Amino acid sequence: MLASDHTLSAFIESFAAQKSLADRAIEQVSDEDLRRALDANTNSIAVIMKHVSGNLVSRFTDLLTSDGEKPWRDRDAEFNDTFAPGAPGRAEILATWESGWTVLFETLAALRPEHLDWQVFIRGESYFVPQALARSLAHTSYHVGQIVQTARVVCGEKWETITIARGGSRAFNAEMGFSPPGA
């Protein structure tokens, strides 16, 4: 396998890992808490999901042939909760969330090693494809962290850890058959 193949695989796996973290956090949150902001200066999980989706759809629609900031995108509107109330709203939120990830993963699957040397544009700025992917992964990861942290807070004692539990590193390493050097 060529380094370029590894690069594309690494981006796909990293985005998938971020989506998995967010999905596992979102599953634990009630419909009501999905839409609750922690304070007046923060966004609810639903709004963050809407923004991430809007960003992914804009950036990865025609990645190689058009600017990543599409003229039809209304970024400011992504920060308004316009979803239907109650359970229908949750389904709409999840559908919006999935639409962004679908565009991302379909685009990533279509990329070929030779595309890594191509330049793409985001708001008129030029990036090589790996730079644009790294930029998007960093942006998405930032917001996934917000989703996980907000979910953790609103779930309180009902929260089920989605990564290695506090104090569980040794047990996890042993389960994975890993022994840190010098241990």
Image (spheres, rainbow, N blue to C red):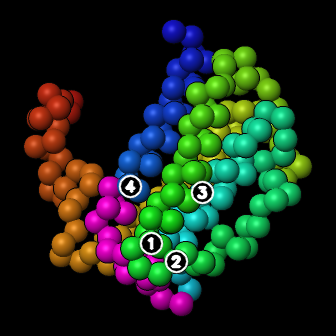
Residue 146 appears anywhere in the view: no
Q: Single out the residue that lies furthest toward the bottom.
A: 40
Coordinates of residue 33 in the picture (x, y in percent): 37, 79
Coordinates of residue 7 in the picture (x, y in percent): 57, 25
The verdict on residue 31 being magenta is: yes
Coordinates of residue 31 in the picture (x, y in percent): 37, 75
Amino acid type shown at disc 3: Ser
Distance Cα–Cα, label 3 vs label 4: 13 Å
Residue at the disc numbered 4: 23
Distance Cα–Cα, label 1 vs label 3: 18 Å
Secondary structure type for disc 2: loop
Residue at the disc numbered 3: 53
Q: Which mark is residue 88?
A: 1
Residue 123 appears anywhere in the view: yes
Precedes in sequence: disc 2 or disc 4? 4
Report the span colored magenta.
24-40
The verdict on residue 127 being magenta is: no
Task: Look at the image and tell me in which quarter the C terminus lies.
Answer: top left
Precedes in sequence: disc 2 or disc 3? 3
User: For residue 52, what is the image quadrant?
Assistant: bottom right
Amino acid type shown at disc 4: Asp
Residue at the disc numbered 2: 84
Q: Nearer the viewer, residue 99 or 177?
A: 99
User: For residue 180, what is the image quadrant?
Assistant: top left
